[in-house]
Image: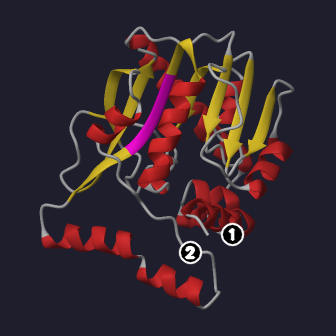
C-alpha cells in the first residue's frame, strides 16, 4: 500500500466521522457542530484575502478562465472560487469528501473530481488560477513535490498558482522539540490504527523553500508570504505575518507564474 493509499484511507475515515471539523479543527465544533454557512463563509473570507493580496502585487488572475482548488474537501474554498471564475474544479483524494462537496455545490459551472493519483486528471495548461492551502502539509514530501510539478503543468501561460506549505518547524527549546517529535511519531494515532479504533491523525510534513524551488522547475516564484496556517487558532482565518513565529511551524504561501 502506497503512502497515498494510506492518506486516502485516513481522509475517508475523517470525512465519515466529521468532515467539516477534519478540515477546520475547532474542538468547540467537533461532533458535527460546525454550521455549514459559517464554515463556507471562512472559505470566502480566505479567498478574498488572497485576491486582495494578489491585487497589491499586480498578479490578478484571469476570471474568465478556470480555477482549480487542490485538496478541496467539501468545497469550502471551491465555492468561493466559483463565485469569481468562469469555471471551477475541486479535486480531492477522498471520495466521501467529494460526495459531500457535490451535495453543497451551488454552481452549475463548478464540478468536483476524486483523484488519488499524483498525475492529476486534467490537460496541460487547463487553469488560469490554481489554489491550495492547508493540504500539502499533510502530504508526504515525495508526493508533494510531484503535485507541485503537476500544478506547473496544469497552469496556463498567463496563469497564477498560489499554494501554502509548512516550510519548517522552529524549535528553539526542549519543549518545542518534543512537540515536533510527537507530531512526527504520532504514537497514540498509531495505536488507534493498530487496534482498528480509527484511521489515525493527519501528519504534518515540512517542505522547505529550497525543495519548493527545485520542484517547480522553470516556473517563477513572484511572491512569498509568511502565514498563520499552522497556528492553533487558524480556523480558516488566513493572516499574513510580518515575521516567522519563534516556535512552531513556519507557514509560507507562494505565488508562482510560468517562467
Which picture quadrant has residue 243? top left
Write the residue at 75% across / 21% down. Answer: 87
Label 2 residue SS: loop
Q: What's the coloring here?
A: secondary structure
Question: What kind of element bears circle 1?
Answer: helix
Crowding around mark 2 (Cα neighbors within 10 Å: few <14, some 14 to 19, many 20+) is many
Q: What residue is drawn where x is 37% and y is 12%?
A: 57
Which badge, 2 or 1, comes first in the chain's sequence? 1
Residue 195, given in percent of the width and then of the height, sits at 60, 91
Q: For the point 71% across and 22% down, which residue is it?
A: 83
Residue 59 part of the magenta-drawn span: no
Residue 155 showing in the rendered view: yes
Return the x and y of residue 143 as percentages of the image width and height.
50, 50
Q: In this view, does 35 lie above or below 192?
A: above
Toward which corner of the image does residue 212 lie, by quadrant?
Answer: top left
Q: Determine whether 204 is above or below 129 in the image.
A: below
**Residue extent of the magenta highlight:** 161-165
Which residue has dot 2 on it? 200
Q: Marks 2 and 1, how far apart in space?
A: 8 Å
Q: In which quadrant is the C terminus drawn?
A: top left
- At 74% from the left and 15% from the top, the residue drawn is 86
Residue 61 numbered tag: none
- Asked if the residue at tag 1 contacts the one at tag 2, i.e. Cβ–Cβ closer than 8 Å, the answer is yes
Residue 236 as seen in the image, left or right of residue 177: right
Which residue is labeled 1 in the image?
13
Amino acid at each position: 500500500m502506497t503512502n497515498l493509499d494510506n492518506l486516502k484511507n485516513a481522509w475517508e475515515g475523517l470525512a465519515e466521522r466529521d468532515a467539516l471539523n477534519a478540515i477546520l479543527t475547532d474542538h468547540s465544533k467537533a461532533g458535527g457542530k460546525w454550521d455549514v454557512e459559517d464554515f463556507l463563509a471562512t472559505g470566502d473570507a480566505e479567498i478574498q484575502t488572497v485576491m486582495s493580496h494578489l491585487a497589491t502585487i499586480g498578479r490578478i488572475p484571469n476570471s474568465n478562465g478556470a480555477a482549480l482548488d487542490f485538496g478541496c474537501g467539501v468545497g469550502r474554498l471551491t465555492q468561493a472560487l466559483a463565485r469569481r471564475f468562469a469555471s471551477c474544479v475541486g479535486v480531492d483524494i477522498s471520495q466521501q469528501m467529494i460526495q459531500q462537496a457535490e451535495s453543497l455545490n451551488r454552481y452549475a459551472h463548478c464540478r468536483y473530481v476524486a483523484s488519488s493519483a499524483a498525475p492529476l486528471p486534467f490537460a496541460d495548461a487547463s487553469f488560469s488560477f490554481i489554489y491550495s492551502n492547508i493540504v500539502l502539509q499533510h502530504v508526504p514530501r515525495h508526493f508533494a513535490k510531484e503535485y507541485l510539478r503537476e500544478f506547473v503543468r496544469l497552469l496556463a501561460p498567463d496563469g497564477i498558482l498560489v499554494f501554502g506549505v509548512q516550510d519548517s518547524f522552529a524549535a528553539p527549546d526542549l519543549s518545542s522539540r518534543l512537540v515536533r517529535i510527537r507530531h512526527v511519531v504520532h504514537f497514540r494515532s498509531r495505536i488507534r490504527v493498530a487496534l482498528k479504533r480509527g484511521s489515525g491523525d493527519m501528519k504534518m510534513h515540512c517542505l522547505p523553500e529550497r525543495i519548493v524551488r527545485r520542484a517547480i522547475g522553470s516556473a517563477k516564484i513572484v511572491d512569498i508570504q509568511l502565514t498563520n496556517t499552522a497556528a492553533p487558532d487558524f480556523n480558516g482565518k488566513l493572516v499574513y505575518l510580518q515575521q516567522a513565529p519563534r516556535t512552531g511551524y513556519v507557514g509560507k504561501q507562494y505565488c508562482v507564474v510560468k517562467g
